């Protein structure tokens, strides 16, 4: 954990700006040509509720950002398939090739914003960001100044959704001081309804085409708990005598509670809620189950139950031990308070 934090504090790993360059230059490799040829095989469109949710925020005067480390042409291909041809109208600012986590940790001189011409970055970096639009690379300080200008607030509040601890949650919360919502698909593997299930509470409500991609091939869905590694959120340790101890939080679980404001299985799980809905949030002063919506995963609920039972057992044993130290006369006193 300390090495992970130290690495990110130093700006993270050094990225090759041409890591995904082959997508727009030619059809080499396997992945990109396959996605280009048949996007529907690899991408699932967002539900109407998610699109309506984005539009409702835009109508309410919220500034919507899309920040991705993918190149502009790949971002366009994906977004057109999952959000529609008019996806650009949903966002005020689109930033591609952001090269996170460096986007949050590096200063403007190290990573300036660049404009795009036909999906090709201009060689000259921008001295500042003075208007909404589609940009490449960039840095948090310049984006922060743009948001101040767009919102008219000295310290605009930002809620950032992401699915990567390394690229999204940690740098956005630590460097950007943003509120962070982590999308944890593994929640669905532990009984937490996500997507269409969040409305119906029925696993059968999951789209047939989504289940079929895995079930038809004899595969488990990505959110399914691992038979080899167990829960994503807790780990069971055994004492020397082989007795099973109370489950401990995994590194992933601890990081979610530390660097995320809350966690959800999918954006669909909150898309139908009012924009002013008050969500529970993670806090060091509250149980670790606080902050998951619509509910915590089964393994954490089980862990909290075992901890509560252990505390009750300790209290009961302490009470019995105290009672045994009292004289018979004191035990019979009707007003005795232990």
Image (spheres, rainbow, N blue to C red):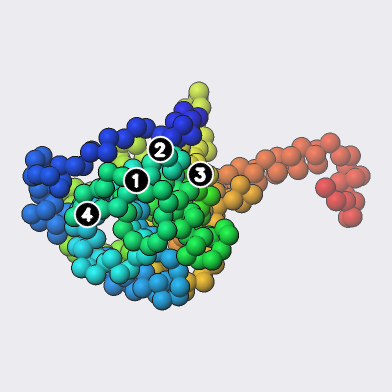
Q: Are marks 1 and 3 in contact (CB under 8 Å)?
A: no
Q: Are marks 2 and 3 in contact (CB under 8 Å)?
A: no
Seen at 70% across and 43% down, the residue is 315
Q: Is residue 12 above or below residue 268?
A: above
Q: Which residue is mark 1?
A: 125
Pick whichever of labels 1 and 3 is earlier in the sequence: 1
Judge by depth and name the residue closer to the eye, 224 or 316. Answer: 224
Q: Are marks 1 and 4 in contact (CB under 8 Å)?
A: no
Q: Which residue is mark 3?
A: 175
Seen at 57% across and 58% down, the residue is 155
Q: Is residue 172 above or below residue 18?
A: below
Position of residue 335 measured from the top left corner of the image (x, y, whole percent):
89, 55
Judge by depth and name the residue closer to the eye, 216 or 316. Answer: 216
Q: CA distance from mark 2 to mark 1?
A: 10 Å
Seen at 35% across and 65% down, the residue is 91
Pick whichever of labels 2 and 3 is earlier in the sequence: 2
User: Neighbour class for label 1 at 10 Å: few (<14), some, many (≥20)?
Assistant: some
Asked whether residue 14 is in view, the answer is yes
Q: Which residue is mark 2?
A: 110
Q: CA distance from mark 3 to mark 4?
A: 30 Å
Position of residue 297 measured from the top left corner of the image (x, y, whole percent):
44, 52
Seen at 14% across and 57% down, the residue is 39
User: Neighbour class for label 2 at 10 Å: few (<14), some, many (≥20)?
Assistant: few
User: Neighbour class for label 4 at 10 Å: few (<14), some, many (≥20)?
Assistant: few
The secondary element bearing badge 1 is classed as loop
Q: CA distance from mark 2 to mark 3?
A: 15 Å
The secondary element bearing badge 2 is classed as loop
């Amino acid at each position: 954990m300390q090495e992970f934090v130290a690495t990110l504090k130093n700006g993270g790993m050094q990225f090759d700006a041409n890591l995904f360059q082959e997508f727009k230059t030619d059809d080499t490799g396997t992945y990109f040509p396959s996605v280009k040829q048949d996007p529907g095989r690899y991408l699932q469109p967002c539900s109407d509720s998610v699109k309506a949710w984005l539009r409702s925020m835009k109508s309410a005067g919220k500034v919507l950002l899309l920040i991705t480390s993918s190149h502009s042409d790949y971002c366009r291909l994906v977004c057109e398939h999952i959000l529609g041809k008019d996806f650009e109208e949903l966002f005020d600012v689109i930033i591609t090739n952001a090269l996170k986590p460096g986007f949050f940790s590096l200063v403007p001189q190290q990573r300036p914003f660049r404009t795009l011409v036909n999906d090709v970055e201009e060689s000259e970096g921008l001295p500042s960001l003075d208007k909404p639009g589609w940009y490449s690379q960039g840095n948090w300080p310049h984006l922060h100044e743009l948001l101040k200008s767009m919102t008219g607030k000295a310290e605009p509040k930002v809620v950032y959704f992401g699915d990567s601890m390394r690229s999204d949650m940690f740098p956005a919360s630590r460097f950007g001081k943003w509120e962070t919502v982590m999308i944890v698909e593994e929640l669905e593997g532990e009984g937490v309804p996500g997507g269409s299930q969040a409305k119906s509470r029925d696993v059968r409500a999951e789209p047939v085409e989504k289940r079929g991609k895995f079930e038809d091939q004899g595969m488990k869905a990505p959110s399914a708990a691992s038979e080899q590694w167990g829960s994503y959120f807790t780990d069971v340790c055994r004492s020397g005598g082989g007795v099973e101890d109370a489950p401990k939080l995994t590194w992933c679980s601890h990081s979610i509670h530390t660097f995320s404001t809350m966690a959800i299985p999918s954006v669909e799980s909150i898309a139908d809620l009012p924009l002013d809905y008050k969500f529970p949030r993670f806090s060091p002063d509250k149980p670790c189950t606080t902050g998951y919506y619509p509910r915590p995963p089964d393994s954490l609920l089980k862990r909290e139950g075992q901890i509560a039972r252990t505390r009750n057992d300790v209290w009961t044993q302490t009470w019995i031990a105290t009672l045994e130290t009292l004289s018979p006369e004191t035990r019979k006193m009707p007003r005795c308070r232990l």
